[in-house]
């Protein structure tokens, strides 16, 4: 096992006469408890998406079809209702698999904290799509979708994969690499 | 293996073993290859979701893969951790292909696929980390 030099990223600077300032955390939160809270929210969101992927059942996706149809029967945003009615419902098998894969991937990647900021954006988009389908449906509490959106915004802002996540383990390596994928992952984390 | 990666693998392995063990207990009353699976965590406290489904075969597979990952983390063997990652990838693919069908060897649903995918991604990436790093 050999040591690796700290990357010259500009994030850590000391001089011979000035006291060392520990600034290795990307967001410089001093309280350990406060650092871990975004990770807890990230993992909770991962469980949320994973568990809700569970009721998307191929090949018919009956429950998903019923909820998606609310976009037409209880419209929230007319252009979206038109899209659902004319593009999504007629091709529902494809759409069902797409939703299943996106929500399962959201669950998996948020659980392990890989490319967290990218998946937080995907989570916000998916939350928006769900909200546009069911916001006016019976027995829905609209604030649940606003809170879902805000929770994803919070983990995006806090870069929640950098604590207790793979982003935190790998980010320094990605920064040291010149590869396109590594640079993309730096942005996505 | 990097110490932080090793700790991460340890936590993931213990989580996998725990979920598999709980799943096995829940699945004791079901047929060994129950296609629909048995809920490991009912999700009642999580809003009535369907968190994780496994039958006994799926539960044993999850525990076995967790044990392989645990051994890899304890003995700093990247090959073992990679083997666990590839095993979870195979389990994820099998679950995805069979979910919703009459034949479902592991008793999984899409939520089970998500957890297997997390194991596949997590252990595979952790097995690639060979050098220590000081910066985050």
Image: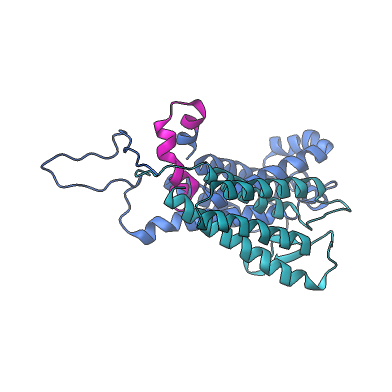
Chain colours: A blue, B cyan
Quarter of the view holding residue B60: bottom right
Q: Residue at x 34, y 42 (%)?
A: A3
Instruction: Name which quarter of the figure residue B39 lies in.
Output: bottom right
Q: Residue B2 location, x and y as percent?
A: 44, 48
Above or below, A14 against B64 in this view is: above
Q: Position of residue A104 (x, y in %)?
A: 67, 48
- Is residue B134 one of those drawn in magenta? no
* Residue A45 left/right relative to A60: left
In the current view of this chain or complex, which residue is farthest to the left? A17
Q: Based on the picture, tell me whether residue A168 belongs to the magenta stretch.
A: yes
Q: Residue at x 52, y 29 (%)?
A: A181
Q: Could you tell whether A153 is left or right of A53 in the image?
A: left
Observer-nearest residue: A67 or B64? Answer: B64
Could one spot residue A135 in this view of the protein?
no
Whether residue B67 sits left or right of residue A68 in the image: it is: left
Q: Position of residue A169 (x, y in %)?
A: 44, 45
Q: Which residues are magenta?
A: A161-184
Furthest-right residue in view?
B102
Q: Residue at x 74, y 34 (%)?
A: A83
Q: In this rendered view, identify the residue nearer to me: A175 or A35.
A: A175
Quadrant where the image shows the N terminus of chain A: top left
Residue B22 seen in the figure: yes
- Residue at screen point 54% across, 55% down: A43
Majority secondary structure of the magenta segment? helix
Image quadrant in which you'd find residue A178: top left
Q: Exactly how many numbered labels are in the figure?
A: 0
């Amino acid at each position: 096992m050999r040591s690796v030099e700290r990357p010259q990223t500009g994030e850590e600077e000391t001089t011979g006469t000035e006291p060392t300032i520990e600034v290795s955390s990307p967001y410089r939160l001093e309280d350990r408890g406060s650092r871990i809270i975004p990770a807890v929210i990230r993992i909770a969101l991962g469980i949320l998406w994973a568990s809700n992927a569970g009721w998307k059942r191929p090949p018919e996706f009956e429950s998903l079809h019923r909820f998606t149809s609310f976009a037409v029967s209880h419209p929230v945003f007319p252009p979206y209702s038109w899209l659902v009615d004319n593009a999504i419902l007629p091709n529902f098998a494809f759409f069902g698999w797409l939703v299943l894969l996106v929500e399962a991937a959201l669950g998996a990647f948020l659980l392990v904290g890989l490319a967290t900021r990218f998946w937080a954006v995907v989570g916000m988009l998916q939350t928006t799509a769900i909200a546009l389908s069911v916001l006016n449906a019976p027995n829905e509490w609209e604030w649940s979708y606003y809170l879902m959106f805000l929770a994803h915004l919070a983990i995006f802002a806090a870069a929640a994969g950098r604590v207790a996540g793979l982003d935190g383990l790998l980010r320094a390596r990605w920064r040291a690499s010149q590869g396109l994928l590594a640079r993309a992952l730096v942005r996505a984390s | 293996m990097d110490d932080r990666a090793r700790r991460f693998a340890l936590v993931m392995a213990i989580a996998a073993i725990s979920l598999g063990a709980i799943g096995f207990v829940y699945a004791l009353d079901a047929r060994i290859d129950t296609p629909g699976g048995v809920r490991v965590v009912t999700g009642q406290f999580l809003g009535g979701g369907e968190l994780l489904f496994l039958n006994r075969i799926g539960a044993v597979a999850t525990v076995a893969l967790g044990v392989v990952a645990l051994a890899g983390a304890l003995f700093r063997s990247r090959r073992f951790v990679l083997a666990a990652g590839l095993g979870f990838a195979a389990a994820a693919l099998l679950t995805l292909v069979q979910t919703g069908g009459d034949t479902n060897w592991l008793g999984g649903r899409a939520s089970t696929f998500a957890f297997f995918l997390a194991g596949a991604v997590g252990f595979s990436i952790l097995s690639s980390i060979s050098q220590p790093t000081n910066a985050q």
